[in-house]
Amino acid sequence: MKPARLPVAGRPQLARLPALIILVYAAAVYLLFLAVLGYAAAFFAGRGVLKGIDQGPRAAVPAAVTIDVFLLLLFAVQHTVMARPWFKRRWTRIVPEPAERATFVLAASLLLALLFWLWRPIGGRVWSLPGPGAAALWAVYAAGWALAVSSTFLVGHFDLFGVRQAWLHARRVRYSPPRFTERGLYGRIRHPLMTGFVVIFWAAPVMTAGHLLFAAAATGYILAGIAFEEHDLIQSLGQTYTAYRARVPALIPRPWPRRPSPRSSPSQEDDRKQAA
């Protein structure tokens, strides 16, 4: 069945102009996000960029910790508040609804870029693995990125980053969120994207005090963010998500996954809300 098309205004070219602007805006935000994501991969690895997580101007330890924690909190507050349904309802009175997700991605990308720019390294090695140990952790680091990126395509990559909403609006097609899914990685863990990021943060052949601060704080935020997200998912999906959560672990897969019972099997018609 083809998606329902919205009614066309009397002057199509004038009516489509705002939609075209939103589409260009969403595409530009997506390209910015890709640039920031690529920088993030090099930032945590400390390779290929002028300033990595253990590089750049230094400050006294108390000042460095204060600056770094503030930057992490700034990102966490933005990411948490802007993802909540109550905020979206108010925000879309100002920002066009098809541009809401792209605006969320823009704010997150700019705050990440700010974090990379102002981050202050903190010396002191927690661990340092040479030779084969370092090579193994670099492989795990790459696997973390592969897990994070691939998981976005299972739930709607372009929807997650706001491009699909703008594209459908430009085509005058009514938007509907991606359907709830348990396929692939989501049949083993509920949050493979977050699992990928946890792996990325901790898979460091050389773990400094500053890197440890980032990894610990970001992991704590991920655990808190999952609680917020799942509260919203239960509100929107009800028993479907409650049964899924009881059966599938959040971040670490079980060796033998539980099979869904007839009562708890999710309906393929339910929509999975992107609350991250």
Image: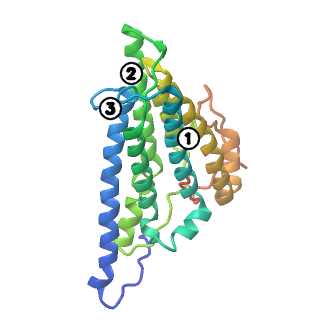
Residue farthest along the top direction in this orientation = 131
The three-letter amino acid code for the residue at tag 2 is Ala
Q: CA distance from mark 2 to mark 3?
A: 22 Å
- Of badges 2 and 3, the one in the foreground is 3
Residue receiving disc 1: 191
* Mark 2 in CB contact with mark 3 (< 8 angstroms): no
On the image, the x and y values in percent for residue 174 come to 45, 72
Dot 2 or dot 3: first in sequence order is: 3
Relative to 51, 115 lies left or right? right
Q: Is residue 118 above or below residue 16?
A: above
Residue farthest along the bottom direction in this orientation = 10
On the image, the x and y values in percent for residue 95 come to 45, 70
Q: Is residue 185 visible?
A: no
Few, some or many residues within 10 Å of mark 1 (<14, 14–19, 20+): some
Q: Quarter-wise, where is residue 249 in the image?
A: top right
Residue receiving disc 2: 139
The secondary element bearing badge 1 is classed as loop
On the image, the x and y values in percent for residue 219 come to 57, 34
